[in-house]
Amino acid sequence: MPERSYKTDALVLYSRNLGEADRLITLLTWEKGKLTAVARGARKTKSRLAAGVDLFTFGNYQFHRGRSLDLITGQQVKEHFAAFREDAGLYPYALFLSEIAGRLSNSAEPSPEPCALLLQGWRLLSGRDRPDPALLCRAFELKMMELAGFCPYLQGCLQCGTAEAFLFSPRRGGLFCPQCAESDALRVSAGTVALARRLLGTPLARVKLIRSSARQKKELAGMAAAFRRYHLDIGKLRSLELIRLVEPAP
Ligand SMILES: [Zn+2]
């Protein structure tokens, strides 16, 4: 029989009001994967749960198993990334990291790697020496897809292996050379392919050292979006609509 209460480090992905005074929050947790739980009375000013239910919070949470949803019974906030809620230029990117992490984590299994990656993404984005937010998002998304086991193949032609592969098929999930490509493949530039490989092979903390052009970032974003539509049933991302509003038109 499962224990009636448990504890885990977690990151708040979504948070919304429920009823008169409660909050319903979705967390990505180190021990239990993604879960949604109720923080009863968290909107009352004196609630001891109030501090830990906001978006972009990292903390240790205690839960009590409920019949349908579990209840949050205690918490200890470790870091709160308030900058994202105060800076309209950063918020969409921070939300993108949360949305991608949340949509690609659907199991109740321990998820230490996605959690660590998301926490690192939030830290880098809120730090003083932050990387280009758009490039951070591209790197984060590729790495998160890789962790989830759904990463497009970018190392060469998916069929014959040649490195000269600059035709991307969202449907077949990777790059192809002209001989192996089918008619649905889209031509991408060598620079964009090189950028994608570098982002995958570079730790998130070193993404700020990678140079890229606006065109490469845009092309890579398009490849990732097309791949997501074909292979990941994750629906619309609110963050992408917001990013469109803050990014300068190319
Ligand atoms: Zn080929």
Image (tube, helix red, strand yellow):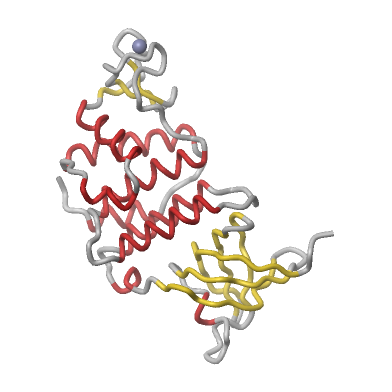
Q: Of residues 54 and 234, which is closer to you in this image? A: 54
- State the image coordinates of residue 99 (x, y, percent, origin top left): 45, 54
- In this rendering, position of residue 190 left or right of residue 140: left
Considering every residue shown, the one lying at the far right of the view is 1
Residue 119 figure quarter: bottom left
Give residue 40's quadrant in the image: bottom right
- In the image, 220: left or right of 234? left
Ligand 1 position by quadrant: top left
User: For the N terminus, which image quadrant?
Assistant: bottom right
User: Farthest residue in the top direction?
Assistant: 179
Residue 234 or 50: which is nearer the viewer?
50
Q: Quadrant of residue 144?
A: top left
**What residue is at 57 percent from the left and 52 percent from the top?**
111
Residue 192 vs residue 60: left or right? left
**Vertical placement of residue 18 versus 124, above or below:** below
Q: Position of residue 18 (x, y in %)?
A: 59, 74
Q: 59 or 23: which is nearer to us?
A: 59
Horizontal and vertical percent for residue 30?
57, 58
